[in-house]
Amino acid sequence: MGVVREKKKIGWPVIILIILAPFILRFAVGLFTGHDIEDVRAKIEEHLYEKYGEEFVVTQIGTRSSRGKEFYQARIYPRSIIGTNREWDDYYCASASVSKRSFGRLGGVGDSYSYVNRNMDVEEYLLPEIKNIFGERVLIKVDVAHEVTGDGSWWAGYKSVSLKEVRKDIAEDPERNRIILDLDVYIFDRIEDEKEKEERRKEIFELVQYLKEEGLFEYLEMRVVFVDERVLAPSYKKYKYEISASRKVNEYIKKEDKTVNLPPRNLRKKVSKVLQQEVNEMSEEELLASMRKIRKDELSYDGIRKWNCQYLSPIYSEGLVKERYTSSYNPETINKYKEIKDIKIGTNLEYIYFK
């Protein structure tokens, strides 16, 4: 008869160890190889929801290092812009970071979306008056900085989230707070003659006076860009690529006594004619709908401005020139924009269209 052996019972310490094994393994992996990406994503998402009151997409999570310290960094944008023309526009995106700590811990979260939020807030504030001055065919691009200082010898960016907050800080301590405004105003309506050009000059002057009244002129760099409305035609994108790929030729501009590198005249004439015919058949509502599809990252020299800008009016306040373009600053000749004639409207020599 065989000997019956008594089965050994598994003790509680062993059971607890078995239960905790996955967590211990995860901790060890985090300790030696990094944290779980989903934990990083969840921490950033929670931070952003608590701070801004809406859900964000947190993507492209990777590791970075600065001054010997490692941290996670991600690209972020609100879920609310998914499916709109803002989704792939860098203007509406920001970054968030989480510091890496020892023993698998994650540090606090920091983000730069406050800058995006502030830009949108200022845009929302300015756009109604700008449309009131120039009409509905207007898009604007804002880049506003709130800077603070200790003794005036240095200035650093501050993460205020709204124009109201910036103004409050300036009102309380004007010597240590300032607002720097970069403003691009794109008007999708070409100027037909000198009479209309003078009317536009008056409108730009009106905008400058408005910005002065609002306390937004002291550190201002602004471009008022008059864009040919043919960019709103359905076939514009097709011809845009054809123009970009074309072999450029030197063309002498007699009126300006300058030679410019432009697409071939035959191509320019064809594009001008075809797009004008399309625009003639579009209603104002269709033109505005087409304009609203234009992304912020297209409102640039390499985007719309290079070939399609007819006229450009640059505005630089004295404070901005003194701060940003020191070598050009001359208090005796600086433009104060006190009269309509102080508004200069220059021709874009790279403008490709024919009437």
Image (tube, grey):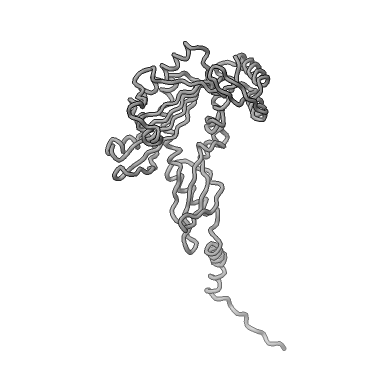
Residue 228 in sight from this viewpoint: yes
Quarter occupied by residue 178: top left
Q: Is residue 102 above or below residue 187?
A: below
Percent position (x, y) of residue 145? Answer: 40, 37
Question: Horizontal placement of 206 versus 349: left or right?
Answer: left
Q: Residue furthest right?
A: 1
State which quarter of the image contains the C terminus: top right
Out of 230 and 71, give the one closest to the viewer.
230
The mark total stands at 0
Q: Residue furthest top?
A: 195
Question: Horizontal placement of 189 versus 170: left or right?
Answer: right
Percent position (x, y) of residue 69? Answer: 47, 58
State which quarter of the image contains the N terminus: bottom right
Residue 288 in sight from this viewpoint: no
Quarter occupied by residue 36: bottom right
Question: Residue at left 48%, top 21%?
Answer: 346
Question: Residue at left 38%, top 17%?
Answer: 340
Question: Horizontal placement of 148 versus 266: left or right?
Answer: left
Percent position (x, y) of residue 254? Answer: 56, 17
Q: Residue furthest front?
A: 257
Out of 239 and 15, give the one closest to the viewer.
239
Percent position (x, y) of residue 187? Answer: 50, 22
Q: Is residue 104 above or below residue 141?
A: below
Question: Residue at left 38%, top 23%?
Answer: 208
